[in-house]
Image (cartoon, grey):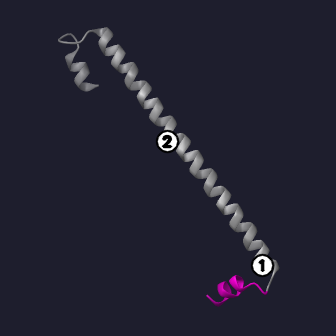
Amino acid sequence: MDKVMQELGKSLTDQDVNSLAARHFESQQDLENKWTNELKQSTAIQKQEYQEWVIKLHQDLKNPNNSSIRYLILL
């Protein structure tokens, strides 16, 4: 955008600059939306994995003969 502003009045008109600025803004918005969606998806996956881990741990703790619990206790 700095280069575009330097060309204002030389090779670019106000309309050209406004058009480029609008496209730049849209591109930034698209990128922000992409990363927001990526973050939401990653957070949802991590939440689901953590929930499954907590449920499995709870089930394992209810069963004292479970070898994975004995392994954890030995550590």
29 relative to 4, above or below: below
Which is nearer the N-term, disc 2 or disc 1? 2
User: Percent position (x, y) of residue 15?
Assistant: 32, 9
User: Percent position (x, y) of residue 27?
Assistant: 41, 29
SS assignment at label 1:
helix
From the image, tell me which residue sits under label 1. Answer: 61
Mark number, residue 35: 2
Judge from the rendering whether residue 2 lies leftward or rightward of residue 40; answer left or right: left
- Classify the position of the C terminus by image quarter: bottom right
Residue neighbourhood size for the residue with mark 1, other residues' Cα within 10 Å, grouped as few (<14), some (14–19), many (≥20): some
Query: Type of residue at label 1?
Result: Leu
Magenta segment's dominant SS is helix
Judge from the rendering whether residue 33 lies leftward or rightward of residue 60; answer left or right: left
SS assignment at label 2:
helix
Residue depicted at x 41% and y 25%: 25
Quadrant of the rendered image containing residue 72: bottom right
Residue depicted at x 75% and y 67%: 55
Query: Type of residue at label 2?
Result: Trp
In terms of depth relative to the viewer, which is nearer, 56 or 3? 56
